[in-house]
Image: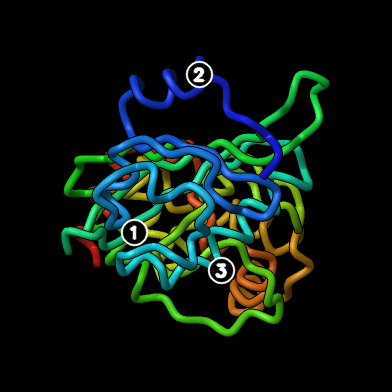
């Protein structure tokens, strides 16, 4: 851990709302604020320095390999990664977070680690969304998934065809067993429009049937991808339908 966190960056981590900190190239904590320590089971933030997610004192430690894989994705791509996390913290309370991971760079702009920020989402609907999504089980061929049953990447999967925002939303609901009528109701569009988009999705994924579309989409990582444009109204309808 040769990289030294400047007092200015430490002050930023300590004064911004949310759970903040940074890790080195090996995913060891370089710094973390007190809220991060509280959520992960430590009395003092200094206790986290030099540790990894494998050392967390909370149930979320089970997702440590996942967290580290996400760190590697940021290190390799040099891009920001946004994730919806729903975890049981050290106080045994379930919480939902919007987590943002970005590259940590030195003065020469070299990537030397990752910065993380976890903003708690105090929305009951989002916590229920996570419970709903956990009902989905699958066996994907790609073992290097960056998500688990309680962690969702927000944005576009790195693999597979490029989809429009509407196609992402329809695929999200389709993967959860929603009919064209239910999807139409959730998104406020006509059922025929949903069916048209489903046909386009089958063409983009090279699928001959709806079941084959679902299978290919899951293999490419769309199961745990949360479309950024999915409205709050749509989420509430999803929960009622569940």
The answer to whether residue 13 is seen in the rendering is: yes
CA–CA distance in space, label 1 to label 3: 36 Å
Determine the secondary structure under disc 3.
helix
Q: Choose between 123 and 177: the one closer to the eye.
A: 123
Secondary structure at numbered mark 2: helix
Identify residue for label 1.
182
Lateral position of residue 82 relative to residue 77, left or right: left
Q: Is residue 190 shown above or below 119?
A: below
Q: Is residue 175 visible?
A: no
Q: Vertical placement of 180 versus 29: above or below?
A: below
Name the spot of residue 58 as percent of width and height, x first.
30, 65
Residue 141 image position (x, y, % from top left): 70, 81
Q: CA distance from mark 2 to mark 3?
A: 30 Å
Quadrant position of the N terminus in the picture: top right
Residue drawn 32% across and 65% down? 57
Q: Would you place residue 55 above or below residue 115 in this image?
A: below
Task: Out of 181 and 23, give the one closest to the viewer.
Answer: 23
Q: Are marks 1 and 2 in contact (CB under 8 Å)?
A: no
Q: Earlier in the sequence, mark 2 or mark 3?
A: 2
Write down the residue under mark 2.
7
The residue lying at 63 percent from left, 36 percent from top is 80
Whole-percent x, y for residue 219 in the image: 67, 73
For disc 3, the marked residue is 65
């Amino acid at each position: 851990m040769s990289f030294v966190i400047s007092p200015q960056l430490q002050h930023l981590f300590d004064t911004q709302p949310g759970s903040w900190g940074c890790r080195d190239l090996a995913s060891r904590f370089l710094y973390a604020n007190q809220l991060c320590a509280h959520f992960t089971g430590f009395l003092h933030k200094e206790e986290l320095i030099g540790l990894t997610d494998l050392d967390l004192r909370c149930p979320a430690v089970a997702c440590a390999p996942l967290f580290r894989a996400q760190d590697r994705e940021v290190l390799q791509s040099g891009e920001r990664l946004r994730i919806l996390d729903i975890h049981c913290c050290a106080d045994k309370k379930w919480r939902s977070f919007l987590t943002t991971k970005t590259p940590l760079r030195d003065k020469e702009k070299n990537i030397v680690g990752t910065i993380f920020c976890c903003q708690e989402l105090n929305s009951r609907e989002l916590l229920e969304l996570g419970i709903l999504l956990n009902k989905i089980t699958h066996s994907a061929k790609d073992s290097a998934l960056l998500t688990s049953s309680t962690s969702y990447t927000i944005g576009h999967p790195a693999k597979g065809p490029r989809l429009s925002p509407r196609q992402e939303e329809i695929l999200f609901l389709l993967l959860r067993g929603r009919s064209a009528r239910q999807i139409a109701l959730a998104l406020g569009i006509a059922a025929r429009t949903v069916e048209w988009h489903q046909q386009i999705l089958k063409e983009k994924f090279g699928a001959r049937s709806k079941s084959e579309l679902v299978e290919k989409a899951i293999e490419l990582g769309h199961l745990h991808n949360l479309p950024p444009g999915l409205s709050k109204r749509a989420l509430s309808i999803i929960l009622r339908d569940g």
